Image (tube, rainbow, N blue to C red):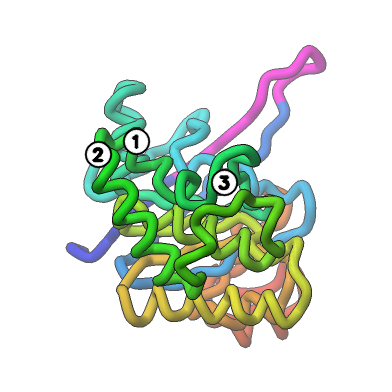
Amino acid sequence: MTDTLLRIAHLFKQYDTVAGPVPVLHDVDFVVHKGEFVAIMGPSGSGKSTFMNILGCLDVPTSGTYELAGQDVGKLGADELARLRNRVIGFVFQGYNLLPRATLEENVALPLIYAGQPANVRQARARELLAKVGLSQDVGSRQPNQISGGQQQRVAIARSLANQPQIILADEPTGNLDTKTSDEIMSLFTQLNTRDGITIVLVTHEPDVARYAHRLVRFVDGKVVYDGEVAAGLEAPHGAGAV
């Protein structure tokens, strides 16, 4: 389909250790279309973090194919891969990953440095994005330790939007937040998805967070054991369901 944003087929991943190969992902097929909002769940050790690293072009599969925005990732060199990642993907992490000694404005503008944008463009874009995620104009000159965790995650989301990505990959984006702040962050993701058409794939352990998504994918022992409606996937016993 023309609206396919990413497609993974027969993905297998193992790590070679001194004790021998350790399989992590087994024959995973996964397709995401533009505009989807997908939640990924699974117990610790199920392979979902490795899977997200592969989606983000931060790791490579042992075998299988990955097409992102129409390009075969396995055929790209390091520089081409970095450009694709910076242009297509925005990242949001549980720990925010903000530079502690940089201002919030500088943190938001960081991807624009890699994209080669001049300072005046970076500054204007950072201010625009901080406002977009609901932060006041005076916040930009502060440093991360001067604002709350919820505000830091808003800054991280603003940073993920710097290069107008087609997809945001969010790894436990509410993991360090209280319930009220988590709801605010998830409402922001919903707005980005419905209003701006940004595709979102997020990992979460929380059913209340997964309910914001339109589709649920569940991993167990490196395999996709459920891929379908969120409500049905949350009600089904872990490991049960159609794929």
- Tag 3, which secondary structure? helix
Instruction: Let me know if residue 235 is in the magenta part.
Output: no
Residue wearing tag 2: 117
Q: Which residue is mark 3?
A: 51
At label 2, the amino acid type is Gln
Q: Is residue 207 above or below residue 82?
A: below
Residue at 53 percent of width and 59 percent of height: 155
Q: Is label 1 in contact with label 2 (beta carbons under 8 Å)?
A: yes
Quarter occupied by residue 182: bottom right
Question: What is the three-letter code of the residue carrying label 3?
Answer: Phe
Cα distance between the residues tagged 1 and 2: 6 Å
- Point out the stretch of residues depicted in magenta: 10-21
The secondary structure type at the circle numbered 2 is loop
Q: Quadrant of the C terminus?
A: bottom right
Which picture quadrant has residue 99? top right
The image shows residue 113, relative to residue 45, as above or below, that is: above
Mark 3 residue crowding within 10 angstroms, few (<14) / some (14–19) / many (20+): many
Task: Specify whether 224 is left or right of 88.
Answer: right
Left-right relation of 117 to 44: left
Return the x and y of residue 161 as percentages of the image width and height. 38, 57
Mark 3 and 2 residues: CB-CB less than 8 Å, in contact?
no
Residue at image point 73% right, 72% down: 206
Q: Which is more N-terminal, label 1 or label 3?
A: 3
Query: What's the CA distance linking mark 3 and mark 2?
Result: 31 Å
Residue ranking furthest to the left:
2
Residue 14: image location, x then y, percent: 63, 30
In percent of width and height, residue 138 lies at 50, 64
Q: State the residue at coordinates (46%, 44%).
A: 106
Q: Is residue 146 above or below residue 120?
A: below
Residue at 34% over, 64% down: 128
Q: Choose top left, top right, bottom left or bottom right for residue 137.
A: bottom left
Res 113 label:
1
